Structure formats: C-alpha cells, structure tokens
Amino acid sequence: MGRLLYELGRVDEKTRISNERASDKIGKGSFSWAWELDGTTEERERGITMDVALQSMETPHRKITILDAPGHRDFIPNMISGAAQADCALLVVDAATGEFEAGFDRGGQTREHLVLVRSMGVSQVIVAVNKLDQVDWSKDRYEDICAQLKAFLVQSGFHPSKTYFIPIGAMSGVNLVNMRGQEAAPLKRWYTGPALVDLLDILQSPARDIYAPLRFPIFNVFKGTSSSTGVSGRICGGIVQVGERLRILPGDETAIVRSIETESESRPWAAAGSNVTLYLTAVDPIQLNIGSVLCPTTDVITLASVFSARIIVFDIQVPILAGTSVELFHQSRDVSASISKLNATLDRASGAVVKNNPRVLTKGMSAEVHITIRSASLSGPAARAQPIPLEPFSVNKEMGRILIRRGGETIAAGVSCPREGGLSILISILRRNRFEHHQLSRATFSAPRISCMYT
C-alpha cells in the first residue's frame, strides 16, 4: 500500500528517502514502504501492523479512504474495528512457496480475515496475489492460489461477481498502476488484465441512509486544540453538523460539535459513510470512550444488556452450550458476554425454525440465541454489567452486526433481531431513560466515497 500511494503521488520523494534511510538504520530496510502507514515506533521496530491507520487516495472516479488493518492474530480485535468501518476489502496474499499455504490452511489468518470482513457486511473484495516475482512470475502458481481462494470466497458468502483477482509485484511496483518497465516483462507474457488501481476505480459505493438518526461509534479519542477533544470514526447513519449538541451513550452526558474534519479539511457537515474527526466542546474527556456512540439528544440509540441475535456458527471444534462465556465485538467495542440461552436452530436458507431449545450448537449451524453482557468485575457494587449501544439489524445494519470470539478464535457472527427478549428489553431501557421510541421513515442516497480495508 505504501508503494501504491507513492505511485499515485500521495507520498513525496523526500518522505520515501527518509523512510528508506531510517528503516535501513535499524535493520528493517525491506519494511520501508510499510512505514508510510505503520507510523508508531513499536510498529516500525517489530515490523508488523498493530493498529488501524487511515490514509486516502484518489482514482479517476473514486475517492477512497484506506484503513490499514493488522494481519497478525494477536491484533484481531483491532482488525475487527477496521472491518466495521469498511465498504470493501483489499486482501493481499503472499505467493511465495509455503507462505500462502501457511495463511490459508485451517486456522490461518487469510481464512479468518475473509470470514471476519464478510461477517461485518463487506461484500466486495479484491485479492492481490503479491510476491509473484519470488516464484518467477509463475502463471500456474497464480491460478492455483486463485482457484483455492475462489471456492472459499463463495463458501464464505462472497458473490463471484463482486470478487476480483490480480497478480502484482508490490516492492517493484509491477501492476499497481501500470505494467511499464523491464521488471513487468515476465508478467506481460501471460497477463493482459487491469492494474490494481483500475480495479479500485470500479468498486461500487453502497447506499447511505442519511435520513436515519445520527449514529457515530467512536473509534479513537485524542486531545484536540484549545479546549476541544477529538473523536474519530465512521458515521453509520444520518448527518452531523457543526454546532449540533449530541448525546454520548452509554452515559448521561452531551457535547457540542465545534468542528468537523475529513482528510484534514474542515467541513460544515458530514453524512453517513464518511470517516471523520469531530472536535467536541462542553464535555469532560473522561466521558468519551472508544465504543461509545454519539447520537441526537432527541433520538438516542437504544442500550441493551440482554438481547436476541441470529448467528451462524463457524468451523469450531468445541460446541456452544447455554452459558458459554465469549467475547462480544460490536463496532469498536469489545465486552465480556455469555450466550445465556439457545432459543432455536434455524434453516440457513429460509430462516425457518428447525428445532426449539437445542442443547448445543455445532459447526455450520444457524441459530437464534440470547446474549447477556457480563461485567468485567467479579463481585461488589461494580459487578453490574454496563449495557451497550445496539440497534436491531432491521433498523440499522451497521449498528446491528456482532462478532463472537472465544479463546482467541472467532466462533460465530450474526445480527441483533427484534424478537422476544431482544427488542422488548431495548425498549424498556429506552423508556427508563425517558425517551420515546418511534418508527422512522427511511431513505437512501449514493455517495461517491468508499472505505476500503487493506489487510
């Protein structure tokens, strides 16, 4: 990605030379291009991406926000935060002998990343088969990798019409923007398709719901200028304007939007689908936490400590029982929870109930369950679990998706649903907060900006 940004003029020559010299100095010369997105000292010293970095680029027909997500299994929670903000994915796989197999075999990160991004609603994916120069630009190696990935992509829920494959040699810049130069000659012998930037240019921007109430999950919090506090994230619905007073949930605090920034440019307003930074005033920074949601004071998001969800169980070895302790991921929030009740198993095609009150859930099953948020404290007054901001999937798709992990493994994904024990609990909590729940008229509009998660 660093080389692509350089080819498109987003990285100047001075920065490239500086990164090259600094990386050579600490014995990490081969990581110089990655330093454009891996900006922290720890990331550069270890040679791995640890947090989600944001950059932007332009193609002839698209403005793209890049979310550089970690690939290492230790930082999957950060990767999930990136996936929650993305419209499409750029998956880079290593064509070197043994490297692709290590990522694609059972338990490998290539498999898990594809499952995760699809579970978070990403339906478009570009697979860049990189380092083909290390296998002498072998067409057979490229086609073998594509064949294995195509079958898995279909199995994971990606439609073939929305998946693209491309051979590249990123270090030398082959087929990122074009195939000029002597280094591209071996690839030209058998590949005549588009370059990577051409595929990025045809990605489709999804419909944006600007008439829904504002939903802004906080991805990061930092000190702003003067007395303001900055929060960054992606708008999941509605519009935010400068001067607007917003409610912070969970909690009972409000804040005023002092300014809005997109790509370091000030804006008077921003709409659903935009990755923005809001600078807030009239609020104590301690009230702003990663995972909290900003919303209008007149139309707040619901809070839930117990809810119903429809989930699909992945390739697991240990079955899921009632009472199973799990980690629940929702937007940028990661909380302890338990699957407190197994309501029913469902037919994956029609959604019809197959069996009520099953004893266990095993590999490949679809089910409706009750999920209960657990407190991080073991006992005492603080043991009460704090509810999380959540909406049924039918109301807001982005705010209704969840992921479930256990023991460092993603075991299920699904959506919150307005059924018994789910929406009824959400509404009761809302009424206790003295806000009226009402049906919203909804409309959509297409925006030209796309958020692309790169991993």
Image: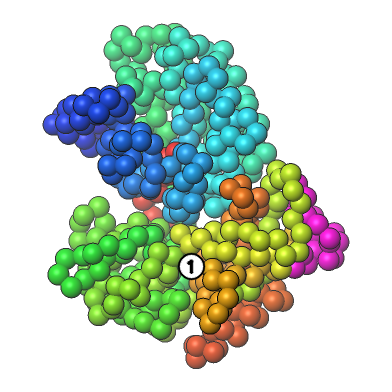
Quadrant position of the N terminus in the picture: top left
* Residue appearing at x 59%, y 30% in the figure: 104
Does residue 431 show up magenta in the picture?
no
Identified by mark 1, the residue type is Ala
Does residue 356 show up magenta in the picture?
yes
Indicate left or right for 52 with 15 as reference.
right
Quadrant in the picture for residue 280: bottom left
* Residue appearing at x 74%, y 44% in the figure: 317
Q: Which residue is mark 1?
A: 443
For the record, the magenta segment spans 341-366
**In this figure, which colouring scheme has been used for the structure?**
rainbow
Tell me residue 296's x, y (percent): 39, 78
> Where is 19 relative to 359, above or below?
above
State the residue in front, 334 or 277: 334
- What secondary structure is marked by label 1? loop
Tell me residue 237's x, y (percent): 44, 66
Tell me residue 48's x, y (percent): 38, 36
Direction right: furthest residue: 355
* Residue appearing at x 70%, y 51% in the figure: 313
